[in-house]
Image (spheres, helix red, strand yellow):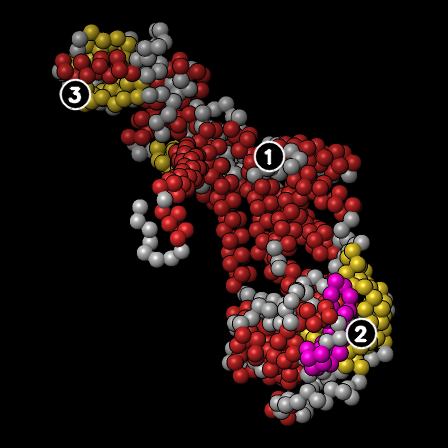
Amino acid sequence: MSSPTEGPANTGSFVTEEALQRLKKRHAAEARFKLYGQLAIGIAIVALVALLVSIFGQASSAFSRHVLSYDLNIEASYVDPEGTRDPDAIARNVSGFNLMLQDQLADEFLADDADRNDQRELYGVFTRLAVLPIARATADAPETIGSEQIFNVALADDIDLFLKGGVSARKSVEIGTVAAGEGSTEDGVTLTLASQDDAEKLSAALTELTRTDVDDAPAVALIKAGNTWYRMESSEGRNLSLTYLAGPRVLPAEGAEMEALVLAQSQENRTVTDRQIAWTKILQTQGRVKSVLNTSLFTNSDSTYPELAGTAAAIIGSLLTMLVTALLAIPVGIFAAVYLEEFAPKNRLTALIEVNINNLAAVPSIVFGLLGAAVFINFMGLPRSVPLVGGLVLGLLVLPTVIIASRAALTAVPPSIRTAALGVGASKTQSVFHHVLPLAAPGIMTGAIIGMARALGETAPLLLIGMVAFVAEVPDGPMDESTVLPVLIYKWSTGAERAWEPQTAAAIIVLLVFLVLMNLIAIILRRRFERRW
Amino acid sequence: MDGNMEHFTQTKSSARADTASAPIKVDCQNIDVYYGDKRAIEDISLEIEDRSVTAFIGPSGCGKSTFLRCMNRMNDTIESAKVTGKIFMDGANINDPAIDPVLLRSRVGMVFQKPNPFPKSIYDNIAYGPRIHGLASGKAEMDEVVENSLRKAGLWEEVKDRLQAPGTGLSGGQQQRLCIARAIAVSPEVILMDEPCSALDPIATAKIEELIDELRERYCIVIVTHSMQQAARVSQKTAFFHLGKLIEYGDTERIFTNPEHGRTQDYITGRFG
């Protein structure tokens, strides 16, 4: 070890073997610690990305939906049988509009001898209530009766889901052309494929989609020949025996194009029947099934039908609730914090109050719901399910958060500012309101908005004060029955139908957008205030 | 302030001989200060002359800052502090509960150890005091108060073009002069300075000392300092504190050349403290 050229003798100890060893250890510890930190950040980022990807992935299908699109002559005999042209009567006459569309579909797809089960199956491709917007539009403009109008009617959620790739695993196979055909629509048809290769392709697809873990659940094939749809019952070499499903009731001509839709599940095991699939496919080839932006997600209120349910009422409910919460929690919280921090004498009582405020911040939110139910509803007699009560409960819930954040912000203001103000003869109140509070404002606002964000996402206390009620109308004010976004999400997530799943994810995104907006406002306000100094 | 301001700023004080006949501005009688159970000041009586600089010296923790803060009742803001005794200012006892400390502090300005300008513009820093006391009506009058205060603090030439710039953006010495200007702006009679130069470099310190020398023509100035040289340079009277007691008080020249107490001698010659 060569020591540095000059200096006191003991500088040599910095470069001894032992010292270098120690240094190495210290560097290693540093590197290790840095690695732990990066690892922790990495885990957090991965978790966040996974969350967002899964929610957006789930929700993506909810932002578009399929509608049945018909140009129909609005006949007075259906929609206004009395001939009064009374808008209220027309708007109420949902059945009339419904029947008009049902008859149109029956004309196209059902044989004359169709029974009630056939009708029910066909009419199941859309929901009765889906014609409501058309009924309302017609009521607003009764002169359109008798003229041709575009009917855009939401398809039933299961059909919509099927078109989006849900309901059953599937595979489309081109199987060439018809070589020969015999039989009748009523008794069954046998079609012969033009090539052996295509027959093998079809049976390969069937084998591929047949589940091996369940006995006796073979995949099924729906065959389209020309414009007619059949279900394949069995096959022997190139010969397929088929049952008629939908489309022209004639035997396909020789050389007609054939196509197979192989589905993993037979119709007993799925929510959409073979015939409904065939009808939808035919409507799709006619251009009568369109994919549109699902605006009803934002304009509609809650519904028992997922294809009609929207978040409008919950968004307004959430906003009204937040308004009440903000009006209660922010001023009360800030004044409590200012008093405790700047004016209150430091004695046992204030110490006790402080401890209890900190404890309150840790009380489970459902307890606040119980309190709200007991005090606001039972004792004060306020109505259930209203934003006023929800806002009051959430206000109490976030009050400790606001107080704690505001106090922290006030403590962070250097005491020299207070003494400076007092030194030029400002009173205590003047020093607080002229100097301390403006300096603490960014911190206080951040605390307040974090508190509000917490309130926005709160579900449990609202369940206890009845905000879980089914609300089909947008609330008019804080005393109107309403629900809020997180409760709506909770309710939708418990829905039995598969279509609720993307719907729930979409509602979660709406909630997240609100949270991001609030945080953005917080950041902008902070910047503004800080720039003033 | 009145009209002879121009004359005032141009007159450099040249002597410290005119102090002998100065009237008494502050008369402290039997002051005791307790912090909880701890007695920080023990029975101090002291007379401070008007239009002169009185320096408080002593080792750390001897109570000189505490005593200084008695004179504008800043100790009231400390919850555990209790002050007994009487302090007469122009004949009125300022420790009387009937006296509002807010009014007292408009007559007794204070400059702190660390420059503490408000995080506002230079203009607003000065204008704040006059504004809350209603000393200026209208913008023109306020502009005049701000200019006069800054001139008296010797800062006008440096900041006149950027009055709207933040006060916290000035250098340390300028900030301290801004704080002095802020104290002057409310037309006080007494200015208390609690180690005003301890956070400043020698050049800024020299400027502040020069300023103090000028200001004493109009104000009664009390300064707490750790620097013996500073006390010797700027003050006419010096009080030496030790362990909460006033050990010696008298003309600065005499204290530094011929102290009566051995302890004072030890402290100013650097044997302890």
Is the residue A444 above or below the residue A33 in the image? Answer: below
Q: Quadrant of the N terminus of chain B?
A: bottom right
Q: Is residue A360 magenta?
A: no
Which of the two residues, A153 or A291, is positioned nearer the viewer here?
A291
Dot 3 amino acid type: Gly
Q: Which residue is mark 3?
A: A176
Q: Is residue B115 left or right of residue B260?
A: left
Q: Position of residue A520 (x, y in %)?
A: 50, 51
In the image, the segment drawn in magenta is B236-258
Is the residue A442 above or below the residue B229 in the image? Answer: above
Q: Is residue A242 left or right of residue B76?
A: left
Q: Is residue B53 left or right of residue A234?
A: right
> Looking at the rendered structure, which numbered label has been put on residue B46?
2
Which of the two residues, A154 or B34, is positioned nearer the viewer here?
B34
Disc 3, disc 1: CB below 8 Å?
no
Q: Position of residue A92 (x, y in %)?
A: 56, 35
- Disc nearest the viewer among 2 and 1: 2
Q: Which residue is mark 1?
A: A459
Q: Chain of mark 2?
A: B
